[in-house]
Amino acid sequence: AQSVTQLDSQVPVFEEAPVELRCNYSSSVSVYLFWYVQYPNQGLQLLLKYLSGSTLVESINGFEAEFNKSQTSFHLRKPSVHISDTAECFCAVSEVSLADKLIFGTGTRLQVFP
Amino acid sequence: DADVTQTPRNRITKTGKRIMLECSQTKGHDRMYWYRQDPGLGLRLIYYSFDVKDINKGEISDGYSVSRQAQAKFSLSLESAIPNQTALYFCATSDTSDRFGEQFFGPGTRLTVL
């Protein structure tokens, strides 16, 4: 069975500062990895995903995440955050053979201050 | 118009009442899911359906039931609501043809059981 650990429940950061949200996973089989973001009063939306190939994946709004198989991590980073990046961020994992069964982490609240 | 809609968006009810949460989608997806979100616990899967005739229990199905009335509609019922079912509930959909299993979420229903 898979599991996802997000060690930081909250990450406060000032605008234009860099940020890293940590995600570690556990699985005995090959997995797909995802970051979903939930903006205030909205549902979750996919931010980026790692399926295969290049270990560094990027979103259209400047976030990136790197799959590190040896450390079983998929940390999310952004070099300069904006107020509008304030959101609840969820890391999720699914087995390659059971791609519909998403296992979510507990979430990290990214709070950007002016 | 939103692709995945949920009604109601907010509901306050009393212990013991029967409650139905509804989800509709216009994405043409065959797979639908119900999750609940609790602070510090992330999202947990309640039920999922891969087509109209296929219903499966998720991680936390006790106290809930579902009905897949059509490909586009998936309802979640609480037969006798209790206070610890107070949570934010999300419906999601995915497409069988998408082997990576990206899920698309509705805006959520905030349920309070007094």
Image (cartoon, coloured by chain):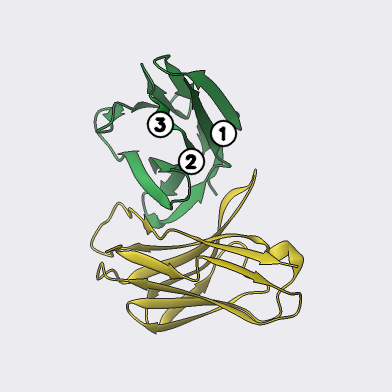
Chain B, colour shown: yellow
The amino acid type of the residue labelled 1 equals: Gln
Q: Earlier in the sequence, mark 1 or mark 2?
A: 1
Do badges 1 and 3 share one subunit? yes
Residue A48: give x, y in percent of width and height: 32, 38
Label 2 secondary element: strand
Instruction: Give the residue number, with chain letter if any, for mark 2.
Output: A90
Instruction: Give the residue number, with chain letter if any, for mark 1.
Output: A6
Residue A36: give x, y in percent of width and height: 41, 43
Residue B93 location, quadrant: bottom left
Q: Earlier in the sequence, mark 3 or mark 2?
A: 3
For the residue pair B31 and A81, the one nearer the viewer reads as: A81
- Is mark 1 in CB contact (under 8 Å) with mark 2? yes
Instruction: Give the residue number, with chain letter if any, for mark 3.
Output: A85
- Is mark 3 in CB contact (under 8 Å) with mark 2? no
Q: Earlier in the sequence, mark 1 or mark 3?
A: 1
Chain A, colour shown: green
Residue at screen point 39% across, 32% down? A84
Q: Confirm whether residue A22 shows in the render.
A: no
The amino acid type of the residue labelled 3 equals: Asp
Residue at screen point 67% across, 64% down? B112
Label 3 secondary element: helix
Which residue occupies the extreme top position in the image? A17
Q: Chain of mark 1?
A: A
Residue B89 is left or right of residue A29, and the answer is right
Residue at screen point 50% across, 73% down? B56
